[in-house]
Image (cartoon, rainbow, N blue to C red):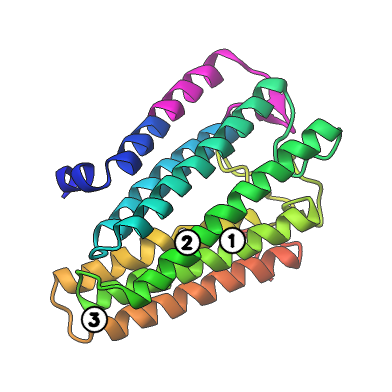
Amino acid sequence: MIKELFNKQRPLMVIGFTFVLLFVALMIASLFDSTEITGVNRWIKPMKFASSIALYLWTLAIYLYFISGRELAKNIIGWGAIAMLVGEIILIVMQAARGTISHFNTATLFDSLVFYAMGLMILANTFLIIYLLILYFRAEINLPKAIVWGMRYGIILFLLASVEGGLMSAMLRHSVGVADGGAGLPFVNWSTKGGDLRVAHFIGMHAFQAIPFFAYTMEKYNVKSATFWTTVFAAVYFVFFTFLFVQAMFGKPLFAGF
C-alpha cells in the first residue's frame, strides 16, 4: 500500500516525509534554544504544525488514491494542499525565529500581513477539501461502502473544525476566560485554567483520520452493518467535538467538565 501511494501520490508522500524531517530538526533546535514565546519554547508550535501537516498530507494521499480517474482534480487538490501548507509552515517558522507569535498577531503591519496571509492559505486549503468532499459524493471510489461513508464523514468533520478555526481567527485568540499562553498541558499547551478552542479544533481535524480508520476496522473484521456502525461512530464523534467546543466557549478547561 505504501509503495503504491509513493507511485500514485508521490508529491504528497515525499513532502509529508519532508515535514517529518522538519519536525526532527525543530525538535533538535528546541533542545539547544530555550527562548520562549508566551511561556513556551518557540520551536514547539512549529513542531506541532510540522507533525500535523505530515499526517494530513499522507492522509490526503490516501483519500486521493482511491478516487477513480479525475486526475486533473486530484492534481489540483494535491498540489494545492502542498503549496498552501508549505507556505503556512514557512511563515510559522519565520515568526518563531523572529521571537513572536504567528497566529492572531496584529502587533505590527508586517505581523498582520503574515497572519492574514496564513489565513488566506488555510482558507484556500479548505476550499480544496470542499472539492474533495464533492468528489467523494460524485466520483467512483474504489472502496467498500462503509469506508466511503467514513471518509465522507471525516471530511465533513474536518470542515466543521475548519469553521471553528475561522472563529478563533475572528476572535484573535484561542482561549476563553483567560489570556492566551500561561499554564497548559505538556506539548499541546492546551489551557488548564480556562477554555481552549484548540481542543475541539484538534479533535475535529483528526476526524479526517479517525472515522475512516474506524470504518476500515469494521470492514476488516467483517462486522455486520458496518456502514450503520460507522454512522453511529461519526455521530458520537460529532457530539464529542461539539461538547468540547461548547465547554471551551464556557471558559472551562479540558478536564474541568461543567
User: 180 and 16: which one is in front?
Assistant: 16
User: Which amino acid does the dot numbered 3 rest on?
Assistant: Ala
Left or right, 249 with respect to 239, comes to right
The secondary element bearing badge 3 is classed as: helix
The residue drawn where x is 49% and y is 41% is 83
Q: What segment carries the magenta color?
A: 21-43
Residue assigned mark 3: 226
The amino acid marked with disc number 2 is: Ile
Q: Do the CB atoms of the residues marked 3 and 2 lie less than 8 Å apart?
A: no
Across and down, in percent, residue 179 comes to: 81, 47
Judging depth in this view, the residue of 125 and 43 nearest the camera is 125
Please tell me which of labels 3 and 2 falls first in the chain: 2
Q: Secondary structure at mark 1?
A: helix
First of labels 1, 3 by sequence position: 1
Residue 162 disc label: 1
In space, the residues marked 3 and 2 are separated at their CA atoms by 25 Å
**Mark 1 or 3, closer to the camera:** 1
Could you tell me how far apart the alpha carbons at marks 1 and 3 are, in whole angstroms?
A: 28 Å
Instruction: Indicate the quadrant where residue 107 lies.
Output: top right
Residue pictured at 62% horizontal, 33% vertical: 92
Q: Residue at x 61, y 55 (%)?
A: 123
Single out the mark in the foreground, 1 or 2.
2
Q: Are marks 1 and 2 in contact (CB under 8 Å)?
A: yes
Distance from the alpha carbon under mark 1 to that under mark 2: 10 Å
For marks 1 and 2 on the same chain, the one whose residue lies earlier in the sequence: 2
Q: Is residue 147 above or below residue 110?
A: below
Q: Residue 186, located in which quarter of the rendered image?
A: top right
Pointer 2: what residue?
129
Task: Reply above or below: 160 against 191.
Answer: below
Using the image as rendered, state which of residue 87 and residue 69 is in the foreground: 69
Provide the secondary structure element on which disc 2 rests.
helix
Where is residue 181 shown, x and y percent of the image? Answer: 74, 40
